[in-house]
Amino acid sequence: MPRYYNSLSDRLGELTKSNRVMVMAELRHHAAEIVLAVEALHHFGCFHCDIKPENLMFTEEGHLVLVDFSLSEVGSGILEAGGRGTPGYIPPEALDGRSHYSGYAADIYAMGVVFLQMYLCPRKSYDIFNDKGDITVSVWGTLHRNEEAAGCLIQELMESNPDRRLPMGVIKGHSFFHPCLDWHKVQRMEYGSPHVPTSTPLEAHYTCNFQSTIRGHSQVNGTMPIEPMDRSIPVDAGHKEGARELRPTEPSTYNSKAHQHQTCRMTDSDSTKI
């Protein structure tokens, strides 16, 4: 099983300790890899429910992978209210009294919070979250690097109304990423990472709990096939022995109902790394 020694949380701590911002090129690169990791997961019909810097680990080459699926949900993505995850990353609709909420929209919200932390670095966590985990800063009040596109993206990912949060296809076409990035190159990890970990703490971080959720996979990153897939196959079709290959399709238009009921198709192949 792969081992990872540094998390995005470690990187943020390193920058905070030295009072440095995360330069926009690094932020954009990490954000793009997170987007592809979450997109790959959602096309499995799996919803992470605990996206945060501690669960985003660096490979030796500096690429990010998403780990720890102990709270994840497989299926329609409709979650029971009450909040699942870490305070600060749980979306407001999970705690507002409704009976159910969308795991898809919840992951999008948490992803926005992670982008906010990278954007606000070197501000410490207690300057962003209060004791209850509520976010206490305004994105638009912190445009300190003249990056309106970044602030706009974060704001749209963290919309209080889940039906107005951006779906993946729109996120990938956002002006923060386009035309700066070629998504095919990001998927193939052809861009060199702006940050390559150099330290190896005594306790290595392991991917965990994903094999009990999706057989045969212990990590999710952006290295998934680009070919379109038939979305008519139900999620349950993926729960068969030897399932390996994921063939995602990319939403091109915003559809609030569609993005709450993600489906995926998995076929037999041993050649695809997820």
Image (cartoon, grey):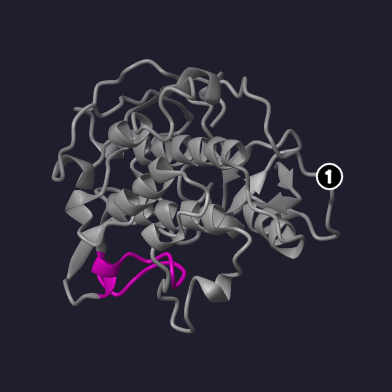
Q: Is residue 192 above or below residue 146?
A: above
Q: Which residue is mark 1?
A: 198
Where does the image place residue 218, in percent across and percent down from the top left?
58, 43
Quadrant location of residue 251?
Answer: top left
Q: Residue at x 32, y 18 (%)?
A: 228
Q: Where does residue 74 sit, x and y in percent of width and height?
A: 35, 49
| Count of number-bearing discs | 1
Identity of the amino acid at label 1? Thr
**Quick one: label 1, few (<14), some, or many (20+) residues within 10 Å?**
few
Task: Tell me if residue 235 can be seen.
Answer: yes
Give the camera-side residue of 197 and 203.
197
Report x, y in % for residue 27.
Answer: 56, 43
Query: Is 153 contained in the magenta span?
Result: no
58 up-or-down from 117: above or below: above
The extreme top residue here reads 227
Indicate the quadrant containing the N terminus: top left, top right, bottom left or bottom right.
Answer: top right
Residue at point 38%, 68% (across, down): 84
Q: Position of residue 21 (x, y in %)?
A: 64, 53
Magenta residue span: 80-95
Magenta region includes residue 93: yes
Q: Can residue 48 be seen here? A: no
